[in-house]
Amino acid sequence: MSKTTKFEELSINRNTLSALEDIDFEQATGVQAEAIPPALEGNDVIVQARTGSGKTHSFLIPIFEHIEGGEGVKAIVMTPTRELAQQVELEARKIAKHHGMRTVAIYGGASIRRQINKLKDASFVAGTPGRVIDLMKRGELDLKNIDFFVLDEADRMLDMGFLPDIRWIISNTKKDKQVMLYSATMPSEILKLAKKYMEDPHKILLSEDDVSAKGIDQYFIRVGKTNKLATLSALLDTEPGKYLIFSNTKKWTQILAEKLQRLGYKAHPMHGDMSQSARTKTMNKFKEGNIDILVSTDVSARGIDVENITHVINYDIPRYEKDYVHRIGRTGRLGKDGKAITFVAGEELEFLDRIEEYIDKDLNIKEIEGTGRIKMKTDYSELSNIYGMVPFRFSLKEDISKWDIVKNMKKHGIREEEVGKIELDEETGEVEVVQSKASRVPNIDFFDNIEVMDKDPRRR
C-alpha cells in the first residue's frame, strides 16, 4: 500500500478523522497504511516496526473505530515502561474525546487510588505489567470483557523479563478478542507467544533495513574516557540541536547531566532513581523545548516519543545490538532527518563490530569541526596498540643510531625495556614507548618535530 495514503482513504469514521485533523495528521505512514486496514477488519495483527514509524496510531485508530462505550474497560495496551504508557494514553485521549470516551494510564510510582478512581469511567487503558496485575488482583481492573489487547514493544518486554506477567494477564481476559502485537525485532519467544494467543494473525514484517533504522545518518567517534566529555561538548557547540544522550547506568546518567549543566548546557537526566513526578516534569520540559539535552538510560528512554530530536548520542556504547536500534530510533522519526553518533573506546571496538554486523551496515567515522568548552588532552591509552605501546614519528636532526635513542630515553626515566620498535631512515624515524611513559617523549629535545603517529580509528 502506498506510503502516501490519506487517512480518509482508510474508511475511518468522521469522529476519528476529526481527531486526526486536530493533531495535524493527514497522511498515514507506511506502517499505518499497512496495519490499519486488516485491523479494521477485525484481524489479529503482528507488526514489526522500529520506534518512530507511527505504530502507536496504527493500533489506536482501529481500537476507537470499533470500541463500544458503556461500563468497563474494553481495550488495553500493555507497555514495558510507565513513560510509554503515559505517551500511549496521551495519544489515545486525543482520539477518545471525539468518541465521548475516557482513557487512563496505570503504572507504578504514582497514586494507585487516583488511578482506581479514573478506571471507573475509562473504556481504554494503557499500563505496565506490574500495576496492571496489582489492580487486577485487587479487583479494581476487570479485563474479562475487553475486545482489544495490544502488546507494544514486545521485544523490550522480553528483555525486561515481563513475558510471564503478560501471559498471566492475557490468560485472564476473554478468549474472543482482537490481539495486536508490535515489536522492533521478532525473537523466537515473541513468536511463540503470538502463536499461543493469536488467531491466524495478519503479519506485517518490515525489512531488516527498516528495523535497523535505515535513513538515519549513523557515525562513530573513536574516543576514550579522557576526552569523552570534551568531545561531547565540541559536538554540542558545533552542531546545535535537540539531543538525546544515552548512558549505560543510572549513576552516570545523573553525573553526566550535572557536568553538562556546570558547563552551561540546558541538560537534564532521566533515570529510574528519579521520582515519577520529576521524570514527568523533565519530559514535559524536553517536549516543550525548555531543555534541549536529555541524558537517559535505556529503560527510561522507552517512553520518550518526542518530535524533532536531531541527535541521538551513545555516550556509552550499548552492550546489546537491539538496544542500539532502539536508541537511535528516537531520531529521524516519520521521515525527518536524524543523526546517531556512537562514542567508542579502543576496548569497545568489539561492540561496534557486533552492531555493524547486526544492522548490516558500517558506521561512518565522524569528524568534529570545532572545539567545545573543555580542552582536549592527549589520551595515550587510546593511542597505544594492543601491546600497550605508543608509536611516535620524529625528524632527524643528525645522523643517530638506535642506541643513541635508547640512551637519551634513559635520561628521561624511560628504561630500555620500556622502549619498543625503533626504525630509522635518512630524514625521519619512528619509536614505540610504553603507554605509562609516553607523556615524557614530547619533552625530549633530542628529537625534532616529534608527534604521535596517526592511528586507524577501527584498529585496536
Image (cartoon, rainbow, N blue to C red):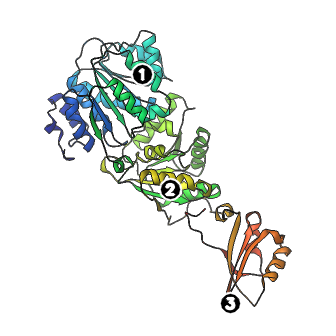
For marks 2 and 3, the one nearer the N-term is 2
Amino acid at pointer 1? Arg
Q: CA distance from mark 3 to mark 1?
A: 75 Å
> Relative to the observer, which residue lies in front, 306 or 38?
38
Amino acid at pointer 2? Leu
Q: Secondary structure at mark 2?
A: helix
**In this rendering, the label closer to the viewer, 2 or 3:** 3
Q: Which residue is mark 2?
A: 236
Q: Identify which residue is drawn at 30% across, 13% down.
A: 145
Packing grade of label 2 (10 A; few <14, some 14-19, many >=20) is some
For marks 2 and 1, the one nearer the N-term is 1
Quadrant of the image for the N terminus? top left
Image location (x, y in percent) of residue 315: 54, 50
Mark seen at residue 167? 1
Amino acid at pointer 3? Glu
Q: Identify which residue is drawn at 42% across, 9% down.
A: 139
* Labels 2 & 3 near each other (Cβ < 8 A): no
| In the image, farthest residue toward the top | 139
> Relative to the observer, which residue lies in front, 74 or 263?
74
Q: Secondary structure at mark 1?
A: helix
Q: Which residue is mark 3?
A: 426
For marks 3 and 1, the one nearer the N-term is 1
Q: Identify which residue is drawn at 42% across, 51% down.
A: 359
Image location (x, y in percent) of residue 150: 33, 27
